[in-house]
Amino acid sequence: MKESTLPNNVDLIPGLVWLGEKSDLISTDDGIQRALLDNERPLWVVEQDGMLCITSAGKIIPGLAAQDGKNVLGFAPALPLTRLGDANFCHTYHTQYAYYAGAMANGISTEKLVITLGKHGLMGSYGSGGVSPQQVEAAIRPDDVHFPVTRLVVIREN
């Protein structure tokens, strides 16, 4: 595992110092990548012995001298997917997330994609333009007792 070293021209955030356990600091490229992909928790970027480290543990104290803790280089706030996009979209379309995915025509996204998106709180489209009525009916009325009876289908012809 490769560790991330700091370039010589790094600016600190003046007046902010991180206090915490050294074992909570992540310095390997793999560890940093995993931490950055976890957008549910805030991250602090700190300097430890010339190494770039990140952590979501410990605390930030304003006004301390750097010798009392670790220099703070940056901050990434928690940004869960539920906070992205327009909340009105979620309310209007009864989704957990303000995201939409799928095809516009020729059924190039499958009904499985639309079902999976729906099960995970997103909106999806099948894209039935250019698809036969029989294929569309089979897609919106799967022969599976686990799916509710379809209540809304929008068909648009050009």
Image: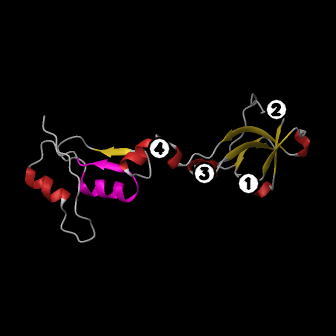
State yes or no: discs 4 and 1 in contact (Cβ < 8 Å): no
24 and 157: which is toward the camera:
157
71 and 142: which is toward the camera:
142
The alpha-carbon separation of the residues under discs 3 and 1 comes to: 18 Å
Q: Quadrant of residue 119?
A: bottom left
The alpha-carbon separation of the residues under discs 2 and 3 comes to: 28 Å
Judged from the image, the secondary structure of the residue bearing numbered disc 4 is helix
Q: Earlier in the sequence, mark 3 or mark 1?
A: 3
Judged by depth in the image, the label closer to the viewer, 3 or 1, is: 1
The alpha-carbon separation of the residues under discs 2 and 1 comes to: 20 Å
What amino acid type should be assigned to the residue bearing mark 3?
Asp
Q: Residue at x 14, y 53 (%)?
A: 136
Q: Earlier in the sequence, mark 2 or mark 1?
A: 2
* Residue 30: assigned label: 3
Q: Is residue 48 left or right of residue 4?
A: right
Q: Quadrant of residue 143?
A: bottom left
What amino acid type should be assigned to the residue bearing mark 4?
Ala
Judged from the image, the secondary structure of the residue bearing numbered disc 3 is helix
Q: Which residues are magenta?
A: 110-126
The alpha-carbon separation of the residues under discs 4 and 2 comes to: 35 Å
* Residue 128: assigned label: none
What amino acid type should be assigned to the residue bearing mark 2?
Pro
Residue identified by numbered label 1: 57
Q: Residue at x 72, y 32 (%)?
A: 7
Q: Is residue 1 visible?
A: no
Asked if 111 appears above or below 76 in the picture, the reply is below
Residue identified by numbered label 2: 14
Q: Residue furthest top?
A: 9
The alpha-carbon separation of the residues under discs 3 and 4 comes to: 33 Å
